[in-house]
Amino acid sequence: MTSQQAPVTRCDRVAPGHHLLELDCPAIATTARPGQFVHVRVTGTFDPLLRRPISLLLCDKHRGHIQILVRTVGRGTDVLGHVAPGNVLDLMGPLGNGFPLPEAGQTPLLVAGGVGVAPLVFLADVLQNSPEGSYVRGLFGARNEDSLVCWEEFAGRCEEFQAVTEDGSVGEQGIVTEYLPAQLDRGDVGVVYTCGPRPMMAQVGRICEAAGVQCWASLEQFMGCGIGACLGCAIATHTDPPNQRVCKDGPVFDARTVDWEKTL
């Protein structure tokens, strides 16, 4: 983990309420793994006080650049969505653990929901460019076309890709978990990776457990320190101790260990 000043090189609106930021940050770009995140100070002051944890969307080791996807949910993320190229942001990262990569011969299925697509784009990119060249399958669900943010970045890194929207504006109509059993019934998926709304991940975890397929889930949580000291992001788990810190012990968890009933 390192803390550094990162100049913003791009800030593009990619969908209503969503912005893609690119930052010049070689120390993070060369060391980060899919599933890890950066903790971003929004301004040079203490207003807003807390940093924002944001998943890494992509890392370009050669250019030393990272990309993050910011969804506007409050004043802090609204500020981040309007930074100008040349502005400098204070980052901590890469933080947390990343996704364990598939074992040799395992076919990975990546299941995304909404803005949760971000860490799965990074994972798909790493798997696609790995020496083994994993055969990546992607399943992406959202409410409508506008919420299917960065789907081209995701689809372009998958050998097979299926989009699902609740209103049917793109791809199949329904919710993404309705289409997961059919994917698993094909019998060739060795491991599932998921990120998105918590109820969606809980259901993905249940379906995978019933099918006997390993599932890794990346959780989002409000955070204070981002390094495991304040315990502000702890969630209930079936582990010992029974509470785990999303920032330090996660954000990626074996879905079977999360107490979904207490975390929803």
Image (spheres, helix red, strand yellow):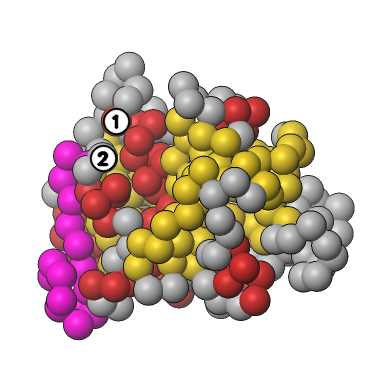
Visible residue check, residue 38: no
Side (left or right) of 210 relative to 5:
left
Question: The C terminus appears in which quarter of the rendering?
Answer: bottom right
Question: The N terminus appears in which quarter of the rendering?
Answer: top right
So how many labels did they put on this image? 2
**Picture coordinates of residue 54 (x, y %)?**
58, 55
Please say if the residues under marks 2 and 1 sit with CB atoms less than 8 Å apart.
yes
Q: Residue at x 30, y 19 (%)?
A: 132
Q: Residue 77 occupies which quadrant of the picture? A: bottom right
Q: Residue 58 occupies which quadrant of the picture? A: top left
Instruction: Indicate the secondary structure of the residue bearing disc 1.
Output: helix
Nearest the camera: 88 or 201?
A: 88
Nearest the camera: 82 or 4?
A: 82
Q: Residue at x 54, y 49 (%)?
A: 85
Visible residue check, residue 153: yes
Position above or below: 195 against 189? below
The circle drawn on residue 128 is 1
Boundaries of the magenta span: 158-174
Instruction: Indicate the secondary structure of the residue bearing disc 2.
Output: loop
Q: Residue at x 64, y 50 (%)?
A: 87
Residue designated by label 2: 157
The circle drawn on residue 212 is none
**Picture coordinates of residue 195 (x, y %)?**
44, 58
Nearest the camera: 16 or 212?
A: 16
**Picture coordinates of residue 70 (x, y %)?**
51, 61
Position above or below: 65 against 230? above
Residue at mark 2 to residue at mark 1: CA–CA distance: 6 Å
Label located before the other in sequence (2 or 1): 1
Nearest the camera: 84 or 77?
A: 84
Q: Residues within 10 Å of mark 1 (few under 14, many from 20)?
A: some
Three-letter code, disc 1: Gln
Three-letter code, disc 2: Arg
